[in-house]
Image (cartoon, rainbow, N blue to C red):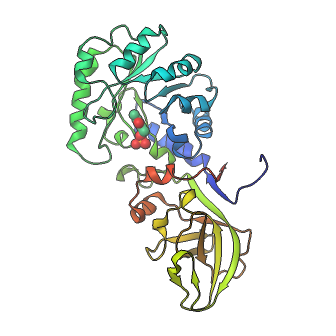
Amino acid sequence: MQDHKAPSRLRLDSAALVTNWRWLARQSGAAACGAAIKADGYGLGARAVLDHLARSGCRDFFVATWAEAAALGALPDGCQLSVLHGVRDEDMALAAQIMAKPVLNTLAQVQRWTASGMDSACDVMIDTGMNRLGLSVSDVASGLLNGLRIDTLMSHLASADEDSRQNQVQLRIFQALVPLVQAKRLSLANSAGIMLGSDYHYDLTRPGLSLYGGIARPEMRGAIQQVAYLEAQILQRRRLAAGDAIGYNATFVAPRDMEVAILNLGYADGYLRSFSAPTGHVGGSAGAGRFPLIGRVSMDLIAICVDAQPDMAEGDWITIDYDLARASAISGLSPYELLTNLGARHDRVWV
Ligand SMILES: *Cc1c(COP(=O)(O)O)cnc(C)c1O
């Protein structure tokens, strides 16, 4: 399998990834800038993201689970890895083995970590109103955190991508808690949170989406660059006669004779059925131009009209229009889903 090339690939722009991280680091002011690489680096490949960013100076990485931490392998010197979902009993064996720290979210997790006798550092998540993971304000007041060796005390913003009052409410709650907990560092902002201003930066920011090209807030437009380019190979070129139908349920009938290319890409690769014509997404763009997607997106295939490209042939590669903002507007899916849905069948090629 080593040398086998898949008929679809993600071309991943390492310079854009690094540029995005550096830009977010600058926007983070005096705070260090980490990187959320959960869900396999938002679908791009966590290990490669880790290596590129570590080489550029990023030192703090975040995954969701211990399996994700284990899959990363050894960390580059000086880097730290946090496991956002904390530790269950089932995780303790891995936690003893792997150079990563849990982000403790519940009192049971705090007790488990304390009782384990592992005196290595941990992080702690405080819930400031998102009501997802994290210790409550009263958990903190109970004093049960005393004695923990806490590296980073953090909370997570629910609405940083909006100009919501909730941002300030969460900030105030976090500010009030800070003096009650002994921790080396404090952290509050995700990608969008970085843009809310220096009050939100503390010692460490934790962007994910915007590293990978997601415009989390309008202020990022023009600065954050696309990282992931979806490319698919032409498997067959064919001619439709006027009146011929194409694809499942014959949703497209050729109004005239047409030249068509069938590409190795479908909804099992994250290319959504909701992009199907006539919703109107333009499927491919390759140097010369853009090609109308025709008929339904299949599990593994799509069809595009290539009338204007007489030279385009079986085996050629087409770059798919996968601008996250536009694809998000068309599909109603968030840029997070669009990235993490990109399937396992693509080769991931860093350039
Ligand atoms: C996913 C995650 C992040 C990164 O969020 P983005 O919106 O992708 O920047 C930061 N912190 C926590 C706790 C997360 O779960």
Query: Which residue does the image show at 63% across and 70% down from the upper left?
Result: 287
Badge count: 0
Judged left or right of residue 160, residue 66 is right
Query: Which residue does the image show at 20% across and 42% down from the upper left?
Result: 165
Q: Is residue 105 above or below residue 315?
A: above
The x and y percentages for residue 2 are: 78, 46
The x and y percentages for residue 124 are: 38, 22
Closer to the camera in the image, 218 or 162? 162
The x and y percentages for residue 217 are: 36, 50
Q: Is residue 248 visible?
A: yes
Judged left or right of residue 44, residue 276 is left
Q: Is residue 10 above or below residue 245?
A: above
The x and y percentages for residue 290 are: 56, 74
Q: Is residue 223 visible?
A: no
The quarter of the picture showing ligand 1: top left
Query: Which residue does the image show at 30% across and 24% down from the upper left?
Result: 135
Residue that lies at the very extreme toward the right in this rendered image:
3
Query: Which residue does the image show at 25% across and 21% down from the upper left?
Result: 177
Closer to the camera in the image, 222 or 147? 147
